[in-house]
Amino acid sequence: MKTYQGSCHCGSIRFSFTSPLIDQGLRCNCSLCKRKGAIMSSFTLAPEELTIEVTGDALSTYSFGKDIAEHNFCNQCGIYTFHSTLRKPGHYRVNLGCVDDINSAQLPFEVFDGASL
Ligand SMILES: [Zn+2]
């Protein structure tokens, strides 16, 4: 297990979590994720497993469609940091591009077929 630290680009949103070593990611082809292009964690985190620190009111939420997933982003720098997932409501996936010590561009990834939901 390893404790990871992450943040948005400007640092207004910081987060940390402990998980097994991250050696893969997940992409989704839904209408939002294909626009973001982010590589997300393949695992989900329960709310108590994700520590979130926000400066001011930088943390914003975007939902669409059936409103089940809540996509969180920084309203200062615009970066998507994590979201509460469709497959496990209330649980989070994080943007691996925001996580320190991970070269997210070189991780292998699976594709979740969110477009077909
Ligand atoms: Zn930011």
Image: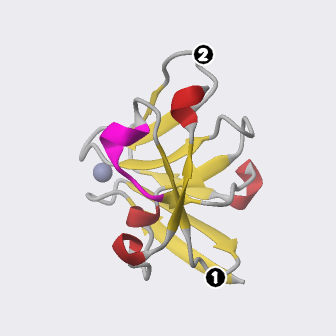
Q: State which quarter of the image contains the C terminus.
A: top right
Tag 1, which secondary structure? loop
Tag 2, which secondary structure? loop
Magenta stretch encompasses residue 117 = no
Residue at image mark 1: 21
- Colouring used for the render: secondary structure
Q: State which quarter of the image contains the N terminus.
A: bottom right
Q: Is residue 70 visible?
A: no
Residue 39: image quadrant is bottom left
Q: Position of residue 22 (x, y in %)?
A: 59, 77
Q: Which residues are magenta?
A: 33-39
Q: Which mark is residue 66?
A: 2
- Mark 1 and mark 2 lie on one chain; the one further toward the N terminus is 1
Amino acid tagged 1: Leu
Q: Height in image: 40 above or below 89?
A: below
Residue 26: image quadrant is bottom right
In the picture provided, is 67 more to the left or to the right than 48?
left
Residue 18: image quadrant is bottom right
Q: Is residue 47 visible?
A: yes
Q: How many marks?
A: 2
Q: Residue at x 35, y 71 (%)?
A: 105
Q: Position of residue 58 (x, y in %)?
A: 36, 41
Q: Residue at x 59, y 30 (%)?
A: 69
Amino acid tagged 2: Lys
Depth check, front residue: 74 or 42:
42
Q: Which mark is residue 105?
A: none
- Neighbour tally class for label 2: few under 14, some 14-19, many 20 plus, Cα within 10 Å: few
Q: Residue at x 34, y 43 (%)?
A: 36
- Neighbour tally class for label 1: few under 14, some 14-19, many 20 plus, Cα within 10 Å: few
Depth check, front residue: 101 or 26:
26
